[in-house]
Image (cartoon, helix red, strand yellow):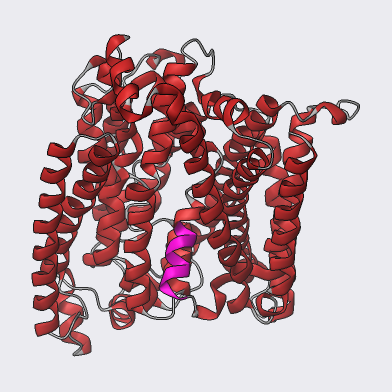
Amino acid sequence: MITVDWLVVGAYLAGTLLVGIWFSRRGAKSFADFFVGGRALPWWLAGTSMAATTFSVDTPLYVTGLVARRGIAGNWEWWAFAITHVLMIYLFARLWRRAEIYTDIELTELRYGGRPAALLRGVRAFIFAVPINCIGMGYAMLAMRKVIEALDIAGPLGALPGEPRLWIVFGISVIVLVYAGLAGLWGVVATDFVQFVLALLGALLVVGFALPDVGGIGGLKITLVERGLGDRLDFMPWSDVAQLSMTTFLAYIGIQWWAFRNSDGGGQFIQRFISSKTERDAQKAAWLFNILHYVVRTWPWIVVGLIALILYPGLADPEIGYIELMLDYLPAGLLGLVVASFLAAFMSTVSTQINWGASYVVNDLYLRWAHPEAGDTERVLVGRLASVVIVGLAGVAAFFADDIGTVFRFMIAIGTGPGAVLILRWFWWRVNAWAELAAMLAGMGIALLSYLPTFEGMEFGVRLAVTAFGSAAIWIPAMFLTRPESEETLAEFYRRTRPGGPGWRRQRERTGLEPLQNLGSDVASGIAGIVLLFALLFGVGSAVLADWRNALLALAAAAAASVVLRWLKGVRSDVGLA
């Protein structure tokens, strides 16, 4: 890092603050403007913001390490979430927008009634706003710390007490806090758009400068085969190098999508859905996110990981191979630009988590339990104070983590369990608040117990299965042993959201309202969408790796899935639901 690099980084940080100041008046107008953007986000901005949120500084490092240790097939650890993310396009995006709520947790007291619903809302709000949110921000800070360490730019802060690298991370987080606190969601999504473009450009620059040194894609593949690493190029986890047993792989694609806590969207995504202009915008935003997240940015990360595997075969920490390539191959100025792209990736995620976590504190804790009559000015002020506390706690969490991949898997484990309930509550009247509370607490408890020394060495897929089915063994009896929700509560929920399927027959008859969803068509669309997304993912990947035969086969499958989707859209149009 020389002067010109620092100037580029400084210009980026200054520009980010200016965006926050520009949107500060709009964000502070009202509670709705601050947390849901006045429900006026266009689909392209909402979708790009969703992609930026999941593109933190930890993700390229995590994928680089994953490819080095386990090959391309190791990415099934996060590719498996594509099943959930495609289903949310057709099953949930429109329902969330239709609910007209401020946070996903607010749905709790729309769907359920009485003290159990109030208890569930409070417990969920605290757990997700504080420990879950702060751990997630903490491992993003851990990744930023690794970048700073590899760039060796913490020297001037050596005189400060504690960890100098974390002082830099703290300073960056304060900048994020300023623009997120000033401008609310509009400031977050506007900077997300710029940050996503910059972060993707950074990955492409690293590939562009380093790839010729390994002989291009052809030389890359030949070298890997010559070194006995050809299995790193496999897309499916059939070889031992992927470290994915059949049990774990089946758990990823057969359990994770319905058992994980984000099965019906997840808090940050839901915030974008309920902030979109229309239901159609929410659905289009979800599709854009899937394309950007899985098809577009996957392959620059993977190619960087493969290049680093060849050029730095003996790295003690393969996750920093990405940073080593930056330092060795990027010229002055462009190095600063790519460092700025890392900052962009970090800031996009943290800004979203700050605003999202603060929305729970204000809407689901402060307004619900402390001061329901608070005006807009007070609500925004409390949101800003909550943001400060959340950033501070996340900084503490960053001190207690060392490996990004380990923390990522831990977050998956403790979030497994409640997913089935979160799906069923939309489509079956009998699910009640006690079932959801039992599923959430049982899943977290079983997952934490599985990390005890007694269960050391438990396969990750087995851990997911035990957590998912163990929690089901608790929440299903809890549901049937407790009262169903009142008919008034169920009718009001149905009147507001009008989901499809046979689970609301009695409420349809009571209200006289037909559903605004064709559940059968939407499930079929979800399946076709999954085929389309994975075909695009593997088709683009095959093309990038110059495997033209498989690229053409995958793209043919994508074309067929697109035809099916268009036909299903026509089915929905015939019944007025498109």
| Magenta stretch, residue numbers | 42-50
Is 519 positioned to the left or the right of 429 in the image? left
Position above or below: 563 against 436? below
Residue 170 image point, x, y percent: 75, 42
Residue 232 image point, x, y percent: 30, 21
Picture quarter with the N terminus: top right
Task: Say if the magenta span includes residue 329.
Answer: no
Task: Say if the magenta span includes residue 48.
Answer: yes
**Residue at the extreme bottom:** 512
Residue 70 image point, x, y percent: 34, 21
Is 114 positioned to the left or the right of 383 in the image? left
Position above or below: 25 against 211? below
Position above or below: 387 against 40? above
Main SS of residues in magenta: helix
Residue 202 image point, x, y percent: 54, 44
Residue shown at 29% from the left, 48% from the top: 82
Tell me how many marks there are: 0
